[in-house]
Amino acid sequence: MKALKLSRRDLIRSVSLTTAGMALAACQPKVVTEVVKETVEIERVVKETVVIEGTPQVVEKVIKEVVTATPSIKVAAGPVTITYWTGWYTDWAKAMEAMRQTGEWQDYFGDVTVEDSGAAGAKFLTAMAGGNPPDAMSHFDYADYFARGVMLPLEDYIDASKIIDLDDYYESGINTGQFAGHQYGLPGIETFGRYGLYMNSALVGEAGLDINNPPETLSDMWEWHEALTEFDDAGNIKKMGWDPCGNMIGHLQWLDFGAALSMGWQSFDKTTGTYHYDDPRMVEWFEMTNKFYEHLGPDNMTGFRQSFGMWGGDFEKSVMAMKVTGYWGAARAYNANPEVSKNVMVSWMPVADDRRGEKVYMLNWHSVCIPLHAKHPDEAFRLKEFLLHDDAALTTIFDVLGWVNGTRKSTMPLYDLGGYTGLQWFGDAISEATTIPEADMNPLAEFARTTYYDVREQCYRGEIGPQEAADVLQAEATKEYQRQFQS
Amino acid sequence: MKEASRRRWLSRSHINQINGMLFVAPWAIGFLAFGAYPILMSAYYSLTYYDGLRAPRFLGLGNYQELLLADRVMKQVSANTIWWVLLAVPAGIVSAFLLANLLNSRFRGRSIFRALFFVPSIVPTMVSAQIWRLVLNTNFGVINTTLVSLGWRVIPFLSKPSLAKPTLLAINCWAQGSAMVIFLAALQDVPKSLYEAATVDGASAWDRFWRITVPLCTPSAFFMLITGMIGGFQSFTFPWLLTGGGPNNATEFFSMYLYRNAFEYMKMGYASALAWILCIVVVLSSIVMFRTSDRWVFYGA
Amino acid sequence: MYGEDELASGGGARAEASLGLRCMARRVVLYLVLTLLVLTYIVPFLWMLSSSLKTDPQIDTIPPIWIPRPMRWENYPEALKYMPWGTYLFNTVVRYTVPSVIGKVVSAAIVAYGFARIPWRGRETVFFLCIATMMIPGAVTMIPMFVVYRKLGWLNTYLPMVVPAWFGSAYNIFMLRQFLRTIPEELSDAARIDGCSELGILARVIGPLMKPGLAVVALFAFVGCWSDYMGPLIYINASRDFPIALALESMAQTLGAHGALKNTMPYMMAISTLVVMPVLVLFFLAQRTFIEGIAITGLKG
């Protein structure tokens, strides 16, 4: 091993080169993407090594910078770790990882570490009840928590934010995040069209139907369904047209109720806290479901729901020709079965017979919200700003998961909707919609949903009649609401 | 005199008393530290409306009233749970016992067979549920896809209300590996000399089974019955993952309904009331079983 | 089944010959029955193994594919890369299972001894109370327990699951007590007369006889920890601290989710296969300990 001989000259040369390099690097202005309209001049203290009288010394220097993407909320000095829990985890974790690699992440967070994790309903509840809430949460039952007053109102943060521009938002999105006069969240992350009629053009063509004349009403759906459904000799379902209990239209959530949107009535009035599940149109909906299920066979259908849950796996296997679901169906179909994906065509969700021509476009709603007793609300709000507004975040999420933030008029140019067949429709359709419904904000969504599924099943299995089903649903929901919110 | 009183103080029964309590102390301490407070709190919650997020609101016996008189699904839930405890639990124990007997005699490959029969009970419940879903699903499970390709009708194992519980019962018997192991250990404890003596006396295999094997396994059977009953009343994770309570509430068991109320409906108070009703039922059943146990459980050789 | 014992205890040569034939016939029937049973028992696992080598579309075809061509062995390394399973394994084994199992075995042995081998006043009542704690469904004690552990500062660790294990779990106590009661009192009495302390009796006299029971407790405790996801779900926050069961559960959640990535089901089946292996091997190796057990010399004759 040759001994490395360093002469003094060598040493000085190498040190000054290094120092010069460091000084140069320290003087570079921070490269930051243009995101906000406002710029801010800040002072930063940097440590520099300068050679003074032959010896390198570390010196502190104050430099003034003009920064164009500064989150406007003051943050605690020093490293902070915040916890962020989300209801859908494994896939979202991949998007989070990808976002951490972007330069913008550093700009927003610097010293702040975001610890993301997954949580189910039980975990959220236990943690909040036990006094250990996360700092930020997303993808949970928003209305339940808003209505019980355990989330932090964010009006002050939103007003002070230099990134958020409320004019850019669709109004319905802002309203959905409000409860009893407070703004608990603004929409983003995964928020786009929620109801579209997906059709498999190959199957439709085989049945002799005209794909360019898609069904508009529930009676149209029945006609198509009959033509598209095939049984084999043993009575098993080979192909079916449409399952009215599946996907979004069969769902009841805090945000909306598929049946109500289709039939055109308001199932829950959030200002008075009253339910209207005994509306005659609910009865008609049950009758319609019965018709389809008597045709298909209840035991058969429960099997489909058990194997594929609510989210269209049967469509992706070319077993079901039509489904009514949101924009994410396009990316799902593409990932699951490109053969089916290339045959996807989307149209408006089917409506009640007397509403032919109504074009209903409902926006999804997800947000990053902050619990009332979160330990680091400032940093959590910064996370919210990032996930909902930063272009790099939005495009990363779309690239990894196919989720769109369609809540603001300015975000649409970010997305290439042509990548997944069917997705473009959701982008074009919003301007043609005749109805963009407001959210229900039903704080008893889980209870109402389970009761709805129960009576609906009893109904299509012939145990109770449609009117009774509607009445039971109404009575149970009303009683429960009184118990939980009005006593 | 002093000698006598000292002897009394240190009498066997006193020593036993102290020793007994000392040995049991770890459990007692653990219970007081980790168990007592939550149990008392749950009793308190059962008298309130409590959603976990807002302060509990006192309701007196309101929850109990509603549970017993006005709950829409309570009848179905109770029927399901009683069905399970009366049918599935004994079925599981009996099948485990028979299997253990089959695997107790010496033959080649015995250990492999034992391991294979034991595997089902060691699989995490979640994995088990996924596997069974892949096997039994009405439209895409392997059994039914085989049937369809043969031109037959599918069997809606988990989607026909009348088939759902029997299917779960069968799966439960499949997963009794732990019971089988306990019985195997118990069978091992049966002294060979008893069998030899009985054979010399001219007893048949059938006799030997019923007069020696079964009675000597009753302590283990008793244990399985009690824990099986307790577990049966609380049976939750597996049906939750497999059927979610359906179809048509055919597999909505008590513990599932309780969990739903606690964490989905935001009715922790009501769920606590359900828990205490369940507890009372189980305690009463256990007392009955303990009292009657002397008649059929045979301890010691 | 019992034929071999008949042979052992005598009979003439002709009797032996006819017994020999009967014996063979019984053997054949036994093997047949067992093989059929075993097949039904392990078909779900064969399907799991088969599914782990497929791609998503092949999972539920009509007719079903038992042997996918090509067999996608890459699923295994890909599934392992999908999430940090090595970390999860470490969490499961080192932080949770090992300390919990040791704790359960030691504490159950001590407490069950106190309930079974020492007569003392109030023993049966306390024992019943112990069992009664099993009768409260976990869901309703979850929130108060969470508060207790939060006050202790044990959140985000495995302490809430490991520490209570060292204070005796009712299930294991019950099981060991049943075993212990089958050992005759005379053994303990003799040792006491010899001047042995209770602890000494436990260590030297009863302890060795308890080995099968302890092995069973250890095995069940191991399996319980391996599959537990409810406790970790509530107490473990950071995903890098997840145990395997919880990671699998979160993987399963994505199966129905909005952005499901490719091949999730086969990956899950691959991980599930890997998860089942260690416990299977453990059982295979350990079964000698408790089934083919120690000669219970004290009980012969």
Image: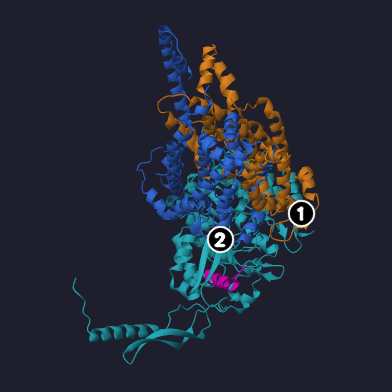
**The magenta stretch spans which residues?**
A374-388
Q: Which residue is mark 1?
A: B48
Q: Which hue is chain B drawn in?
A: orange
Give how far across and how far down residue A455 sits, in percent. 69, 45
Q: Which hue is chain C drawn in?
A: blue
> Colour mode?
by chain
Tell me the amino acid under the disc marked 2.
Thr
Residue in the picture at 72% in, 40% down: B5
Magenta span main SS = helix
> Does residue C216 sit above or below A246 in this rendering?
above
User: Which chain is cyan in the picture?
Assistant: A
Q: Which residue is mark 2?
A: A86
Residue in the picture at 58% in, 66% down: A136
Give how far across and how far down residue A48 sits, in percent. 39, 85
Output the chain of dot 2.
A
Tell me the amino acid under the disc marked 1.
Thr
What is the CA distance from the residue labelled 1 to the residue labelled 2?
30 Å
